[in-house]
Image (cartoon, rainbow, N blue to C red):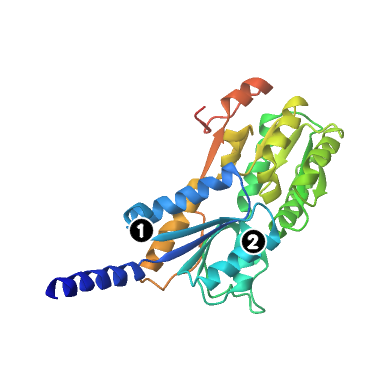
Amino acid sequence: MKKYIIIALVFLTACHQSSKVPVVGFADAFEDNTIEQAKTGFTDALAKNGFDEKNGTVKIIYRNAQGNIPTLTQIINYFISEKVNLIAANASLSAITAIQKTKSIPVFMMVAPTPTLMKVNDAHGNPPSNLFGVGENLDYIDTSFLLIPKIITKKSLVVGMIYNQSEPQSVEAINRIAQLAKDNNIMLVSLPVNSSADVQLVTAALLNKHIDAFFANPDNTVFASFETINKLCKDAKVPVFTSEAGLVSRGALVAYGADLYQWGYQAGEQAAKYLKGDKDLHWEMVQLRKRVYNPGMAKYYQLNIPSGFEPIKQ
């Protein structure tokens, strides 16, 4: 009898310990190699801080909406029903959907703009009390866009862009860049898209307007369709500039912007603090930006890259 009591106690202790393991719901808005870097950074930061799935110290429920909004809503609802300890929201659509569906479960955003740019602040300008993680403003876009006239030295410079008109940060970026282009005597040609399905035709239409460069702004549709955009631009001998460092390894010429792995890592470190009991947290700004270029693309377009840019490893 004593033997069975000991076994029962061990079993109950194990069950009690497993119930203490925190559960993280990780929502990706869509499938994308660049966005994937943020997820890797997030989970690496958790592991470094003692929350590692391999060791059984955290459970991560991962779901990808594949760009479908109803699916994304179902994912967030599932996380809520599972009573996860926190929701990790990769890209702005995931963050917006999560904070619309729950006010009690902490939401840790990454690859997302500030709450102001996402238009989720209340009437007093305060962000949701359960929104944490790492956001980005659009100040860095000025620097990244103005790389174009430094590399393509042409008097009448024409730059093309596409943007998803349903994404607040993308519309905000277009408005900002339009003024920036005007102030710097650059002609900007921008065309809207509604989804990834429109990208090929719209990009082709843009290239028919004889643009000198394409600027890939922080837009989820641009991320998801970048290979299509880049192939069309490469065939037309139109270099792609961007504000997203992760796109350079996928074929963009140069970038000044956030490293998405580090972006996710920063969000993961904050999430780890929360899981350790630190509730005095607030959303943060991206800490690390860098200048990178693609040597293969520089050679292909026969363009000289200014000093201070780090070549990507190929």
How packed mark 1 is, by other alpha carbons closer than 10 Å (few <14, some 14-19, many 20 or more), is many
Query: Quadrant of the rendered structure where residue 55 is?
Result: bottom left
In the displayed image of the protein, which residue is found farthest to the front?
1
Horizontal and vertical percent for residue 218? 66, 49
Inspect this view and state whether residue 219 appears: no
Outermost residue on the bottom side: it is 124
| Residue 235 place in picture, x, y as percent | 75, 25
Nearer to the camera, 274 or 8: 8
Q: Is residue 276 left or right of residue 287?
A: left
The answer to whether residue 68 is above or below residue 227 is: below
Q: Is residue 278 left or right of residue 199?
A: left
Label 2 neighbour load within 10 Å: few <14, some 14-19, many 20+: many
Coordinates of residue 275 in the picture (x, y in percent) = 38, 67
- 264 is higher (above) or lower (below) than 247: below
Mark drawn on residue 72: 2
N-term-proximal mark, 2 vs 1:
1
Please name the residue shown 83% across and 35% down the image.
204
Image vertical order of residue 72 relative to residue 206, above or below? below
Residue 268 visible: yes
Amino acid type at circle 1 is: Phe
The numbered dot on residue 270 is none
Give x and y (percent) for residue 242. Answer: 65, 40
Q: Which residue is label 1 attached to?
A: 51
Q: CA distance from mark 2 to mark 1?
A: 25 Å
Q: Nearer the viewer, residue 184 or 221?
A: 221
Total of numbered circles in the picture?
2
The one nearer the camera, 176 or 106, is 106
Q: Secondary structure at mark 1?
A: loop
Residue type for callout 2:
Leu
Q: Secondary structure at mark 2?
A: helix
Residue at 33% across / 67% down in the picture? Answer: 18
Point 72% across, 36% down: residue: 228
